[in-house]
Image (spheres, rainbow, N blue to C red):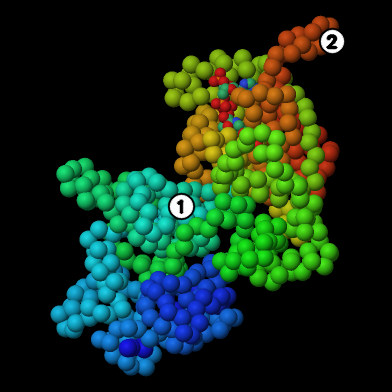
Amino acid sequence: MAKQQITVPDIGGAEGAEVIELLVAPGDEIELEQGLLVLESDKASMEIPATLAGKILQVLVNVGDELSEGHPIVVVETADGAVGDGDAGGDKEDVAPAEPTAKPAKESAAEASTAEDEQTDAADGSSAETQSTENAEAREITVSVPDIGTDEAVDVIELSVKPGDEVAEGDSLVVLESDKASMEVPSPQAGKVVRMLVKEGAAVREGDPLVLLESTVEAAADEPAAGAEAAAEKPQASKTEPTAQREPAPQARAEAAAGKAEPAPAAATSDDSLVYAGPAVRKLARELGVDLAKVAGSGPRERVLKEDVQGFVQRALSGKAPAAATGSGIPAVPEVDFSAFGDVETVPRTKLDKLTAANMQRSWLNVPHVTQFDDADITELETFRKSMKAEAEQRGTRLTPMPFLLKACAHALRDNPKFNASVTADGENLVYKQYVHIGMAVDTPVGLMVPVIRDVDRKSLWELADEVVELAEKARERKLKPAEMQGGCFTISSLGNIGGNGFSPIVNTPEVGILGVSRAAVKPVWDGEAFQPRTLLPLSLSYDHRVINGGDAGRFCTQLVTLLGDIRRLLF
Ligand code: CAO
């Protein structure tokens, strides 16, 4: 029997991460990788896994304690007599195996094999780890966060795989989400998931390790050339692909941040998967039957805390907030059993769909919307545009109405700066942007995306035409980087290729205006003497009435109509 101590591993530099849940108690028998406790920093919650199997003799921390790397957590009695029976943490031989893999696997593997020569450690609690480390040397690769086009941290919102899963090249491993979009990280090659190096809810940056994979590509010995080359070239193949590292260097940090990877809970497919909350809070919510999506978070970045869940339940019980109300007090739509009326099929929504829904609801609830409608006479614009079709083809681009709309909006934004502003959260100030970046809503098979075209006011029609084509394509192939969806001042949502006479778009907060464009049609227009056939383009301008007045909107819309009616004016 040996007493050994397990300490807090490298938790990615987080200082003073709070113990929010203890998962073990003295007397418990624990297995390798079993969760010991849950730590929560301001960035992420992480379950700290056991690096030894055995019996818990002592738990050295309490809920609420703030821990940093190296802090002792538990004393474990291992069944391993070979290690000795020194005090927890006192004896080097005892402590070393108890610590998480704090070194690159290569180093550990080398040490392990040296140690093998010096001592018999077959029964050592770390033997399983050593074995896996040797495998890592030979066949394991660490899949990291690819170039996501931003230095900002993005959230891991979904673990699409779990340890033991077989994956094919291109299979989604995890889903990352920034403020604007979600993005799947595909497997760089076929293999088996050894370990998840990150937890749902963690905040990660480019290069952070995500998944430890055991490659099965090398196993295809019959086709060595194709398989091996593919694997070797993968890391440099494309900037947007995940980084596959032969050296699992940042393993210690990753393991720590990951804790014991859990299979995604069934609840992950419900709306509360979008809620920022730690595992302990999710567990509590599950136990109490609380829908986390309805609980307002009072923690940093609106993180839902245990107290929020408890408060929600108390209010529901005391009748102050009806149980059937959402977090904002709005009565929930009653659940209906549609199968009572006929056959139904229930399909989980995509993350992007749910994210869009959350953004739309937030905008709709926060922004007093008004929509102004008008028609632009684009007869001459269309004549000119069609005359340029051949040239556009020669240039390898397409000249749709969109580049003209972008140009006209850039002019109107410049002349009506309130539309190019945002209101500060406290409502005290307006932030006027000195740049004109315009978002373009793109309808994709997985949902709505809004790439942003930068400096529209400084670009030519051809440049804009190229960008419209390129960004719409990237959006549909889910290749947009978060940076390409950030920084918009105003949005254009064109349903012109689909149809309709008009619609009222929802402002894409924190922007204050959005232009809806419907299908142009030839209609009779009275010129004072006769009806003339003119091509009319229906426009609908929605705006945030906290910032924009009807007069501002009237001027903006009228200017748009004038510019599109006579595109020579775009020259000024
Ligand atoms: N009236 C009539 N025809 C129109 C038109 C309009 N307002 N707008 C575009 N068209 C025509 C184009 O000219 C093109 O025909 P030609 O090739 O003969 O010129 C055809 O429709 C297809 O255009 P497109 O859609 O491929 O290109 P686009 O530049 O007009 O639009 C994009 C690009 C990405 C905005 C569009 O494809 C799209 O995804 N729109 C949907 C946006 C959306 O979903 N909004 C709702 C958001 S809120 O839920």
* Left or right for 179, reference 335: left
Q: Amino acid at mark 2?
A: Gly
Residue at 43%, 20% in the rendered image = 394
Q: Secondary structure at mark 1?
A: loop
525, above or below 470, in the image: above
Pinpoint residue 246: horizontal percent, then vertical percent.
27, 59
| Residue 76, image x, y percentages | 40, 84
> Is 463 placed left or right of 504 in the picture?
left
- The image position of residue 530, as x and y in percent, is 81, 6
Residue that badge 2 annotates: 528
Ligand 1 picture quarter:
top right
Which of marks 1 and 2 precedes in the sequence? Answer: 1
Q: Is mark 1 within 8 Å of ligand 1?
A: no
Q: Nearer the viewer, residue 75 or 448?
A: 75
Q: Residue at x 40, y 68 (%)?
A: 255
Label 1 sits on residue: 160
Name the image quarter holding the C terminus. Answer: top right
Within the image, what quadrant is residue 379 found in?
Answer: top right
Q: Is residue 258 left or right of residue 402?
A: left
Kind of residue indicated by mark 1: Ser
Q: Secondary structure at mark 2?
A: loop
